[in-house]
Image (cartoon, grey):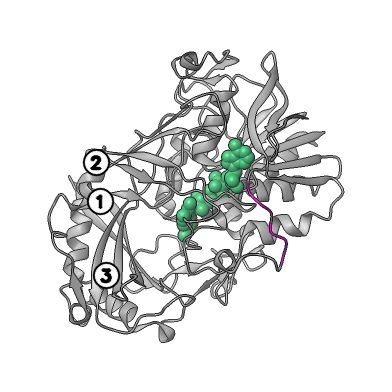
Amino acid sequence: MRVVICGAGTAGCVTAARLSEDPTIEVVLLEAGPHYTPGNWPDSLSHAYRVIRETHDWEYFAQAGASPRLVHVPRGKVVGGSSVTNGAIALRGLPEHYDEWESFVDGYSWESMLPWFRAIEHDHQFGTSPAHGNDGPISINRHPRANWYPIFEYFAEAALSAGHPWIDDHNAPGAVGVGPTPFNMVDGARQTPADHYLDPALSRTNLSLVSGVICDRIRFSGTTAVGVEIIDGDGAERFIEADHVIVCLGTYASPALFLRSGVGPREALDPFEIPVVHESPALGNGMQDHPKISYRFWIDTPIPSWPHPWIQVLLTAYAEVAGEKRLFQVMPYVGQDTAGHKFADINLQVADARGRTGTVRLQGRDPHLQPVLSMGWLEDGSDRALSIVGGAALMELSRIAPFSDVVRSWPNQDDRDHALRTVETFHHPVGTLRMGRPDDPTAVVDGTGSVFGIEGVSCFDASIIPRIPSANTHLAVLALSERLCHAFRTREN
Ligand SMILES: Cc1cc2nc3c(=O)[nH]c(=O)nc-3n(C[C@H](O)[C@H](O)[C@H](O)COP(=O)(O)OP(=O)(O)OC[C@H]3O[C@@H](n4cnc5c(N)ncnc54)[C@H](O)[C@@H]3O)c2cc1C
């Protein structure tokens, strides 16, 4: 059987590597960005201590949501996708939020995901403990507290003084408190599915990677997929035949591909005269993301300059909002502006975000046009309330010594509107092709990633996540795509 995978990002690299382990499956992996072979990565990408937005990016802009602004929402455009441009923060989130997945789709819960979280990782500090893995492809590491820069130590001391518990392992099930941030890195080098899943598999004769091409649309015969129409780097159109298409273009681009292919809500296709292959009313709706609100402080203490760690410590905490226990995350980044002023951006993440109002639509039929993105941040009243409570708690930390001795706040950050004025993405959009049960009109794929109503097409990327995890999403996408590959191979063989 010939499987064509659209998108060599986080999910696409895992999927290509796992499916090509089976010699009866011929795998073709299609990707718009460049492929860097081992040892030839640009420094900026191979180093884990930066988020990349300036290069290897799709340059998408989005409507913010409750705050009417256009905001850059980066996405990696390179083999490895956003795993190569992200912050390399390796968090799982709390079990209770994975347990909520079961309310959408049978068989999904924390217990059912834990083996896949263990399978993907080699945790250098906790690998031998029952909740962790020691043999997986992706190495996880933390900066030991003894090596922290003073600013991070002062932040932790303020959090401890405020009553937050110390935790050694933020990925231990149920851990909430302050402690070292886990990263997918070794000695500052980013550990990605491009290097650790895809590259070792590329020597297989049944796997081919085609980079520098745009996936335009899936071609159907009736409602059965027969392949993918692509556009080469020189603008030529080509057709790649497939017995099965697995879409891994990410939360923004996957729904856009389906819409261009005639799968989606009728009202989203008609304006562009796209013939309807299958009407899928919820496709492109229900996007969730973590709203991020940044609080900037000038700082008077030595800070690391690139390429040294810009993040070392993380605080997660519960807050009560309208009688409910909610979770927020606080993460200080440090840096220096062009005038040489040292700053700390202390970032608040609405970790257990509830909002589901984000959407992806087409701007036109041309695959080079970015999709129309509306993020929906803080449109949910309880998310907005949590952002205010979390922001107040964060500002409180800045008033506790020794942290207060070295930071100076920017004006108006105590103001309740700060969140609405400045909210942006923490880069974790999910849910535009949400998993669900066949009788759920708001679901687009089933628990194996197969798209309802059409044959021969699945989606394995962040788009299908039914409820945003309460942490950064990279590990969740790795674990989910591993699980789906296993299910696919079991089903096919
Ligand atoms: C700036 C940034 C920082 C982040 N920081 C963190 C972090 O520190 N920790 C964490 O856990 N998570 C982080 N994330 C989130 C995490 O990286 C994503 O959740 C995850 O990578 C999503 O995987 P994916 O496979 O769904 O999509 P992606 O990895 O984005 O892969 C999609 C792939 O499809 C390709 N593609 C798209 N459209 C087309 C097309 N039409 N034709 C051909 N190819 C196409 C893209 O180039 C890309 O390679 C961050 C994300 C970003 C963007």
**Quadrant placement of the C terminus:** top right
Which amino acid type is shown beneath numbered disc 3? His
Residue 67: which disc? Answer: 2
Asked if residue 92 shows in the view, the reply is no
Mark closest to the chain's N terminus, 1 or 3 = 3
Looking at the rendering, the stretch of residues picked out in magenta corresponds to 33-38
Give coordinates of residue 238: x percent, y percent. 74, 30
Q: In screen coordinates, is 345 left or right of 184?
A: left
Pick whichever, 232 or 182, lies toward us.
232
Label 3's element? loop
Q: Amino acid at mark 1?
A: Thr
Q: Which residue is mark 3?
A: 164
Residue 59 placement (x, y as % from top left): 47, 46
In front of the other: label 3 or label 2?
Answer: 2
Secondary element at tag 1 = helix
Residue at the spot 70% in from the left edge and 26% down from the top edge? 456
For residue 201, above or below residue 341: above
Front-most of residues 220 and 352: 220
